Amino acid sequence: MIYPPLHRGSDCRKCSYPHRQASMKQQDTNTDKPKLWNSNYIKIWCANFMIFFSFMLLAPLLPLYLSDTFGTDKDTIGLVLSGYTLTALLFRPFSGFLVDSFPRKQVLLVVYFLFFAFFAGYLVAGSLLMFAIVRTMHGAPFGATTVANSTVAIDVLHPERRAEGIGYYGLSNNIATALAPTIALYVFQIWHNYDVLFAISLACAGIGFAINSTLKIAPRELVKPQTPISLDRFFLVKGFSAAATQACYAFSYGVLSTYIAIYGKEELGITSGTGLFFMLLAGGLIVARIVGSRSLRKGLITRNASFGVVVSMFGYLLFAAVHSPIGYYGAAFIIGFGNGHMFPAFQTMFINLAPNSLRGTANATQLTSWDVGVGAGVLIGGIFAENYGYHAAFWAALAVNVVGVLALFLHTNGYFAKNRLR
């Protein structure tokens, strides 16, 4: 066995065998791979799970709640619930500015507390107008919390494990999205009381806030204020190509996710299969994130993105071309598997295109581009479905998806390779 050399000088008599053994142990530790699941990362992962679990616990039953409680018609239900998405979309660019300009933990705790507190508003809203106000305003802290939480998650990851960690971080969303609707329906069947669901969501969000309050984050350099404030404080200009490309994939998802239930019922006679569709979608997402994290760890970012978007494209093709339960359910897993590869790769792209001081802006840009794409898909897909039928809407979703795939191969991948900072 070879030991480290003895110290020279007056301290050499203090060097004993145990000291040399400790030195060797330290050297061995330094050769180990940096730890991925550190305590801060586990906490932020669990807090993110609570964000989406508390949100998705209510999502499938809010239309029924509005109809049963206030006698709301379908058009009004859509209008009331869309306010949440709109405010989340509008507030996300400012969220990136806030987490880059102020201490991130403090910003995270403030917006997370607001996200938690607004669940109490559902319990006390006694009219449709009050519920609409609470729901619409709730979108702002939701948009801000998702940006702040994901930014802090990136901060607490070791640079060598960052791309891999981003992939695993998304599992918290996917698992929560898969579990929450099923649990919500089960709870409602037992109690038949919407207030129970509101209280559970409030408690889960409170647990997430409590978890984040225990984070230990080192101070970092803040972005100095600029006068006048430029566009790149709210939108990552270097990420425009990736944002535009990702919006194409979000467009397709927006069309599919919005009209999947009514299409299944009217065209295929599937009256209770929407839950299984989204379970298969979530299953594909989870499997892909676990498998894809290995290649992200090796730095194969564009390969993961390219593979994911091509797989998803074939999923949309299957859904549009095969009008049967095989196409319906088969497309769910394929699209989930493709998106599970694509989404963390794109998030890593945005992060690697931005300096560390603009991570919040990078995250906000990615999430905003996804929201814009989904919103456009809902709007334009509705026009196609109303005037030309569901099949035309799904073929339009596929066409826009193909445009995004071509853009990735012809421009976005090359642009990222030339302009990445890490």
Image (spheres, grey):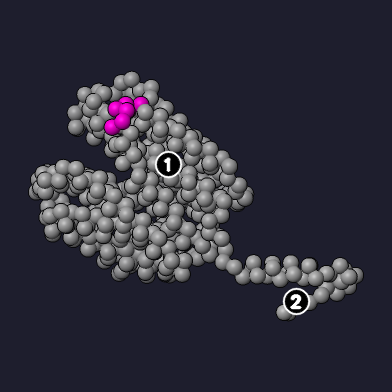
Answer with left or right where residue 59 lies relative to residue 146.
left
- x and y percent of residue 265 in the render? 13, 44
Quadrant of the image occupied by residue 337: bottom left
Question: For mark 1, does the 10 Å Cα neighbourhood hold few (<14), some (14 to 19), or many (20 or more) residues?
Answer: many
Q: Which mark is residue 3?
A: 2
Per the image, is 193 magenta?
Answer: yes
Residue lying furthest bottom:
2
Point out the residue furthest to the right here: 10
Tell me which residue sits at (38%, 22%) in the image. Answer: 124
Report the front residue among 230 and 2: 2
Looking at the rendered structure, the secondary structure element under dot 2 is loop
94 vs 189: above or below: below
Q: Locate residue 4 relative to residue 74 in the image: left or right.
A: right
Residue at the spot 13% in from the left edge and 59% down from the top edge: 321
Q: Nearer the viewer, residue 350 or 145?
A: 145
The residue that appears at 45% across and 45% down in the rendered structure is 48
Q: Is residue 95 left or right of residue 79?
A: right
Which dot marks residue 343?
A: none
- Helix, strand or loop for the magenta stretch, by majority: helix
Residue 339 is situated, as x and y percent measured from the top left of the image, at 32, 58
Q: Is residue 157 left or right of residue 147?
A: right
Please state which of the two labelled residues, at mark 1 or mark 2, is closer to the viewer. 2
Instruction: Count neighbours of disc 2 (C-alpha within 10 A) and say few if under 14, some if 14 to 19, many if 20 or more.
Output: few
Q: CA distance from mark 1 to mark 2?
A: 51 Å
Q: Earlier in the sequence, mark 1 or mark 2?
A: 2
Segment tinted magenta in the rendering: 189-195
Q: Dot 1 corresponds to which residue?
A: 51
Let me know if residue 192 is in the magenta part.
yes
Q: Is residue 305 above or below residue 184?
A: below
User: Regarding mark 1 in the picture, which secondary structure is present there?
Assistant: helix
Percent of width and height locating residue 187 = 33, 34
User: Can residue 416 be seen from the camera position used here?
Assistant: no
